[in-house]
Structure formats: structure tokens, C-alpha cells
Image (cartoon, rainbow, N blue to C red):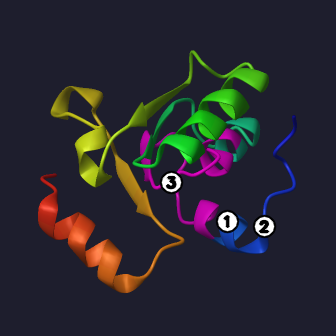
């Protein structure tokens, strides 16, 4: 599966990610954003976090289908709980959800 043709919205989000950043994509859904960023040579590794089992499994499958299991760690976790300090995350992406949910994720997380 190729992800190079992602939505205009995700391409816009991708444009904000600095070159060579390590990202945490909260609510990654199908892991399209981290896959795309690696395909474009923008980043070399990422964490795709997802709290819902179905999208988590989709992300695992998409990452494996794109031979990126060594570059993208897919984690079943709630919000910012998907990473620890040793992950050395540079950028956290929280996109594609409402402002109230984003505020809750930030309020409940620790970064």
C-alpha cells in the first residue's frame, strides 16, 4: 500500500513538521502522516499513537505493509501516554479531532 497520495489536510499538517524531527502522531488513525513523512524523506522515525483498537490495528497493518516497522512504532495508548522522555520526541502532532478533545489530551498529558 502506498500512502503518497494523502489528503490535502494531512499534506498541510506535514508541511509544519521540521526536517529530521522525531514525531508523535496522537490519534494517528491509519498512520498515514508518519508513513507519508518517511516516504518524503522528511523524517526517519515516528511514533503513531492510537487509543481505539480498530484504527490501531489499521496503523499496525499499514506500517508493516509499507515495510516501516523499524521506523514507526505503533502504540495503543491514550493521548500523550504514547511516549516517554527516552523516546526523544521533537514534535507532537494532534490533528483531525475537535478542539475540546485536543484540550483534554493536553490537560491529561505530560510533556
Read off the residue under disc 2. Answer: 7
Quarter of image, res 108: bottom left
Q: Quadrant of the N terminus?
A: top right
Q: Position of residue 86 (x, y in %)?
A: 21, 26
| First of labels 3, 2 by sequence position | 2
| First of labels 3, 1 by sequence position | 1
Read off the residue under disc 1. Answer: 10
Label 3 element class? loop
> In the image, what residue occupies the spot 69% across and 21% down?
64
Read off the residue under disc 3. Answer: 18
Asked if residue 20 lies in the magenta stretch, the reply is yes
Q: CA distance from mark 3 to mark 2?
A: 19 Å
Residue 101 higher or lower than 90, as above or below:
below
Q: CA distance from mark 1 to mark 2?
A: 5 Å
Q: Position of residue 41 (x, y in %)?
A: 70, 37
Q: CA distance from mark 3 to mark 1?
A: 15 Å
Label 2 element class? loop
> In the image, what residue occupies the spot 52% across and 30% down?
45
CB of mark 1 within 8 Å of CB of mark 2? yes
Label 1 element class? helix
Q: Which mark is residue 68?
A: none
Asked if residue 101 lies in the magenta stretch, the reply is no
Q: Is residue 97 left or right of residue 5?
A: left
In the orientation shown, which residue stands out farthest toward the bottom? 99
Residue 27 higher or lower than 95, as above or below:
above
> In the image, what residue occupies the spot 71% across and 65% down?
11
Q: Nearer the viewer, residue 34 or 30?
A: 30
Residue 104 higher or lower than 60, as above or below:
below
Point out the stretch of residues depicted in magenta: 13-35
Amino acid at each position: 500500500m502506498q500512502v503518497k497520495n494523502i489528503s490535502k489536510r494531512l499534506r498541510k499538517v506535514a508541511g509544519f513538521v521540521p526536517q529530521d524531527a522525531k514525531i508523535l502522531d496522537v490519534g494517528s488513525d491509519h498512520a498515514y502522516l508518519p508513513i507519508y513523512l518517511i516516504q518524503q524523506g522528511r523524517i526517519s522515525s515516528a511514533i503513531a499513537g492510537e487509543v481505539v483498537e480498530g484504527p490501531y490495528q489499521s496503523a499496525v497493518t499499514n506500517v508493516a505493509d509499507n515495510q516501516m516497522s523499524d521506523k514507526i512504532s505503533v502504540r495503543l495508548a491514550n493521548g500523550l501516554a504514547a511516549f516517554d522522555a527516552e523516546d526523544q520526541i521533537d514534535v507532537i502532532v494532534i490533528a483531525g479531532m475537535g478542539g475540546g478533545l485536543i484540550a483534554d489530551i493536553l490537560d491529561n498529558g505530560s510533556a
